Amino acid sequence: MQKYFPIILLLLMCSVKKTPNLKPYFHHELSIDEPSDICLTSANPGHYYIVSNRGSIAETDSNGKVVRHTQWDGSDYEAICTKDNMIYAVDESMRRIDIMDESNFKLKKSVYLNYTGARNKGIEGLIYLPDQKKFIAVIEKPAMLIEMNEQLQVTSQTLMKQFFELSSITYHDHFLWLLGDENHEVMKVNPDDYTIVQRWSLPVVNPEGICFDASGNLLIVSDDMATLFKFRIPNP
């Protein structure tokens, strides 16, 4: 049996399906300290909002150049999305969602979430699903998806045992796309049963934010590198 072991090991290694790698076709260093998440603006789909865990929100052009930013700071913004021309920014440590007018960054309302745990173990990502009229938030560890109605009331919580950790979420082409910063992976997920459809590896250090642009290109922001990366998702 021992003489056949190297052959068996080689066959097993060849049978393992490797996670395909994505290679960026564009990257731009950001003038934003510790960027944590990214989403498209409503008024201009060529612009993005990027939040910092230093507590600021910046609007950038398609190349990541800041065109305006908030004049006041939160404390620990980790997630951002838009709905009905309003910005929803999550302050992780305060367990708070700040709702702001997109036109002037004016704070309209703050909603506090009843979620226990360490200050740095709150919501890491937030997205609104217009066809289902609900929000989905992600918790880093243990990896969890929290569904909320349009009033930001929690309706369900699902522990995602198939993920080691989660750092962000977006919604594109009727699928959820989950980001893991420690595993450097992007996962395409069925929104009905949360099964993984496909996954890719990213050559990015500490990827913290994810979204898609109007052309369907994948955008990733790196916290440690303070850089915006763009990828093309290959056809299945």
Image: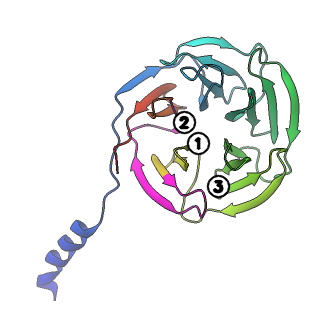
Above or below 93: residue 162:
below
N-term mark: 3 or 1: 3
Q: Residue at the top extreme?
A: 67
Instruction: Write down the residue under mark 2.
Output: 211
* Residue drawn at the location 76% of the way across and 49% of the way down: 118
Q: Is residue 214 left or right of residue 88?
A: left
Is 202 covered by the magenta stretch? yes
Q: Secondary structure at mark 1?
A: strand
Residue sitting at x 77%, y 14%:
104
What's the image's color scheme?
rainbow
Q: Label for residue 170?
A: 1
Residue 141, numbered circle: 3
Element type at mark 2: strand
The three-letter code of the residue at mark 1 reads Thr
Q: Residue furthest bottom?
A: 1
**Residue 150 is drawn in which quadrant?**
top right
For the record, the magenta segment spans 188-213
